[in-house]
Image (cartoon, helix red, strand yellow):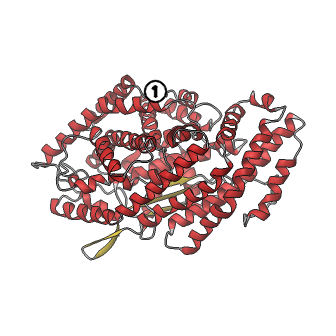
């Protein structure tokens, strides 16, 4: 692979070039400068926003590296302490000062003039929202919440199982659920499930603790519940809880019947009397699991090549990350579960973390996180950090669209034509399975936070009620009821980023629409996609979707229209 030049952070104009975050006493003078500065012209106000953005970018990137290191090495006490230090001693100091800075800006006589400019209107709308919900008494609660959330990764990161004398992470073991030997699948599923259930009480109590803390935050801020608080905190100006309920209903009416068709077809092809949970990942025609790559190095090289074939710029983005050591892809013991793309606000080159083994799903995860990364590159030169901080409905559009756009070049991963066709089909079927799961997790969160005083038995009962309403009617859970009772515990979003999940559903619909445009006209479809991403958060969500040539719409008719397109593509792959 040819050498790639590393990207350096932009020259600082407010903080000294060599300044690093060591503690609050060293940071305080810069915040004091912003608090005391006179904003007597619109130019002074613009410069104030720029300096504040630089300070926030440095802080964000410092916290980012602390989080990245902690999740890469959950058993490293120093990394854990470094993250805790920021959360316990720096963040509580920043929160009240941030509110004072917001109020200072809001009180400026020149704010209205700046608000007329593209991007500043969105920024100022968010600033006023932050003022509205800030409460001093919530600062220590947020510290407590951050420390509680950290426990999830520590518990989940320590989970391993023994398979034939070999210690495996749950991610590594789950690959064996694709084995054609049904007895092997059952054994592996049982071991994974049993290992999760060992910590069911710990994780149950952890969520209860987080629910109680989050509810207190909401009540302090004048909201009836944490759901209503989060809709405001997340800046959901373009849709309401009722729109989420409508999405749930649309998925139930339009997707679940399709899911039933696919699952029934699987049962028939496998020739089993009862389709069990360990029968869901294996190829229904008895073929060996698809192997998309051999190791992290192979995945990296193939992902860069795939992105380059879509557009040279996209490949260059991943190549730069690789050269800077911003990729940690393989699963190992002591590593937190899941995957993410962490935007590093000052340098503008993000970090991709994931737990890859060799599977198709791992490869798709790389395409997904690579889409996020490209988004960061496309917005890195925007004027302010706030302009780059896109809402998740847009961020996930970037990642999920890349999953589908990249499909035309998956021959890099699958040189055999039949394997390539199978990979595409499996991914499209996975989308049909994912949308109901998104609805399940979102509906569960609504219930949990609308009923914060619920008992753990009520939680279990309502989880099963919600799960059943969005699940196929073919899978037989008899004997695995306890595993089903606690399936929600594998979803880290419930612990770490509450209410960040419906966005996957909305963005998935948008991504299908982007892909449909790309299939009609590759150049026009790709250009629309990239032009939309370049907007960062300069425009509203519906306007950004419109720039991509699609609609921000999750009604039943629209979902039905998009599903017909997906089903047609599936038929082409038979």
524 up-or-down from 135: above or below? above
Q: Secondary structure at mark 1?
A: loop
533 relative position to 507: left or right: right
Q: Residue at x 27, y 56 (%)?
A: 483
Whole-percent x, y for residue 74 in the image: 49, 69
> Is residue 465 visible in the rendered structure shown here?
yes
Image quarter in which the C terminus is found = top left
36 relative position to 212: left or right: right
Which residue is labeled 1 in the image? Answer: 553
Whole-percent x, y for residue 463 in the image: 33, 46
Q: Residue at x 19, y 46 (%)?
A: 475
29 relative position to 506: left or right: right
529 up-or-down from 11: above or below? above
Whole-percent x, y for residue 294 in the image: 37, 63
Give the quadrant of residue 199. Answer: bottom left
Q: In this view of the protein, which residue sits in the foreground, 305 or 546?
A: 546
> Is residue 171 visible in the rendered structure shown here?
no
Q: Residue at x 37, y 51 (%)?
A: 455
Q: In this view of the protein, which residue sits in the foreground, 520 or 9?
A: 9
Give the quadrant of residue 43. Answer: top right
24 relative position to 166: left or right: right
Whole-percent x, y for residue 113 in the image: 80, 28
Q: Residue at x 61, y 62 (%)?
A: 65
> Is the residue marked by circle 1 packed among few (<14), some (14-19), or many (20+) residues within 10 Å?
some
Q: In this view of the protein, which residue sits in the foreground, 397 or 488?
A: 488
Q: Residue furthest top?
A: 557
């Amino acid at each position: 692979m040819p050498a790639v030049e590393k990207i350096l952070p932009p020259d600082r104009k407010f903080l000294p070039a060599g300044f690093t975050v060591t503690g609050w006493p060293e940071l305080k003078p810069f915040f004091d400068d912003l608090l005391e500065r006179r904003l007597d012209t619109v130019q002074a106000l613009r410069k104030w926003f720029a300096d504040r953005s630089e300070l926030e970018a440095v802080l964000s990137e410092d916290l980012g590296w602390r989080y990245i290191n902690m999740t890469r090495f959950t058993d490293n006490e120093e990394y854990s302490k470094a993250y805790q230090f920021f959360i316990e001693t720096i963040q509580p100091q920043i929160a009240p000062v941030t509110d004072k800075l917001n109020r200072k800006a809001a009180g400026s006589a020149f704010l209205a003039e700046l608000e007329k400019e593209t991007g500043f209107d969105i920024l100022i709308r968010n600033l006023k929202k932050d003022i509205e919900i800030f409460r001093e008494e919530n600062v220590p609660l947020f510290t407590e919440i951050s420390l509680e959330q950290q426990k999830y990764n520590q518990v989940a990161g320590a989970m391993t199982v023994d398979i034939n004398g070999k210690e495996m992470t749950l991610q590594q073991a789950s690959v064996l659920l694709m084995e054609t030997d049904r007895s092997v699948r059952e054994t592996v599923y049982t071991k994974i499930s049993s290992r999760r259930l060992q910590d069911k009480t710990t994780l149950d109590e952890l969520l209860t603790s987080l629910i109680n803390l989050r509810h207190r935050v909401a009540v302090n801020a004048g909201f009836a519940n944490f759901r209503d608080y989060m809709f405001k905190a997340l800046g959901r100006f373009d849709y309401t809880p009722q729109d989420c309920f409508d999405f749930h209903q649309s998925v139930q009416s339009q997707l679940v019947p399709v899911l039933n068709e696919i699952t029934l077809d699987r049962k028939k092809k496998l020739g089993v009397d009862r389709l069990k949970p360990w029968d869901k990942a294996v190829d229904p025609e008895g073929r060996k699991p698809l192997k998309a790559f051999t190791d992290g190095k192979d995945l990296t090289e193939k992902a860069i090549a795939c992105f380059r074939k879509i557009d040279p710029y996209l490949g260059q983005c991943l190549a730069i990350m690789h050269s800077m050591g911003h990729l940690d892809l393989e699963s190992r013991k002591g590593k937190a579960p899941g995957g993410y793309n962490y935007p590093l606000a000052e340098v503008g080159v993000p970090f991709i973390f994931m737990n890859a083994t060799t599977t198709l799903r791992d490869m798709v995860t790389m395409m997904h996180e690579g889409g996020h990364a490209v988004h960061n590159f496309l917005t890195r030169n925007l004027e302010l950090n706030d302009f780059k901080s896109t809402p998740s409905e847009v961020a996930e559009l970037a990642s999920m669209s890349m999953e589908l756009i990249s499909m035309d070049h998956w021959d890099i991963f699958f040189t055999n034509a039949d394997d390539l066709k199978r990979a595409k089909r499996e991914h499209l079927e996975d989308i049909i399975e994912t949308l109901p799961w998104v609805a399940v997790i979102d509906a569960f969160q609504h219930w949990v936070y609308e009923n914060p005083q619920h008992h753990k038995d009520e939680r279990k009962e309502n989880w099963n009620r919600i799960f059943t309403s969005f699940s196929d009617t073919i899978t037989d859970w008899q004997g695995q009821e306890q595993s089903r009772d606690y399936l929600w515990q594998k979803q880290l979003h419930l612990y770490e980023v509450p209410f960040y999940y419906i966005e996957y559903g909305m963005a998935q619909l948008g991504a299908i629409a982007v892909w449909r445009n790309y299939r009609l006209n590759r150049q026009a479809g790709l250009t629309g996609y990239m032009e939309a991403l370049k907007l960062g958060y300069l425009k509203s969500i519906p306007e950004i979707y419109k720039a991509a040539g699609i609609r921000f719409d999750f009604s039943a008719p629209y979902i039905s229209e998009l599903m017909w397109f997906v089903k047609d593509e599936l038929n082409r792959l038979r």
